[in-house]
Image: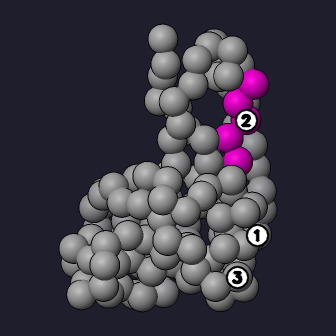
Amino acid sequence: MLREVLHSKIHMARVTRALPHYVGSITIDEDLLRASGMRVNDRVLVSNCRNGERFETYIFRGPPGSGAIEVNGAAAHLVEEGDEVIIMHYALMNEAEYAQNRPTVLIMGEKNTIKQVMRYEPGP
């Protein structure tokens, strides 16, 4: 059996742009993608800490070092520039993969720089 479990998370990133007329997705700084293990076209769940809105979308690559967290398309109506968001990436894993999984969590600082990197330990 496969279970959908947390693979990685970007915690408390700030939205740098909301572009409702752009092709849908979330654009994330390439450096953050690399550090978290997320990839272009991966599906993510985004939670807006200001208003509680949650939505799914897929990832576009942003310029490295840009700090870009841009919400595009219809989902742009659910955020405002400056909102703090949590971006969660899940993966399907079997029991053996789950036992080895240590989700990477990026705690964000000013201008969407990485303040801390954590790993979650698997539970029972």
- Residue 67 sits inside the magenta stretch: no
Q: Residues within 10 Å of mark 2 (few under 14, many from 20)?
A: some
Q: Residues within 10 Å of mark 1 (few under 14, many from 20)?
A: few
Give the mark, 3 or 1, whose residue is nearer the N terminus.
3
- Please, what secondary structure does the residue beneath circle 3 have? loop
| Residue at mark 1 | 115
Instruction: Please name the amino acid that badge 1 sits on.
Output: Lys
| Residue at mark 3 | 64
Give the mark, 1 or 2, whose residue is nearer the N terminus.
2
Q: Is residue 104 above or below residue 5?
A: below
Span of residues in magenta? 100-105
In the rendered image, which quarter contains the C terminus?
top right
What's the mark number on residue 73? Answer: none
Of circles 3 and 1, which is in front?
3
Q: CA distance from mark 1 to mark 2?
A: 19 Å
Residue 49 appears in view: no
Instruction: Please name the amino acid that badge 2 sits on.
Output: Arg
Q: CA distance from mark 3 to mark 1?
A: 17 Å
| Residue at mark 2 | 102
Residue at horizontal 57 percent and vertical 25 percent from the top: 93
Q: Quadrant of residue 99?
A: top right
Colouring scheme applied when the structure was drawn: one colour
Q: Is residue 86 left or right of residue 54?
A: right
Instruction: Please name the amino acid that badge 3 sits on.
Output: Pro
Q: Is residue 68 above or below residue 9?
A: below
Give the mark, 2 or 3, whose residue is nearer the N terminus.
3
Q: Front-most of 17 and 121? A: 17
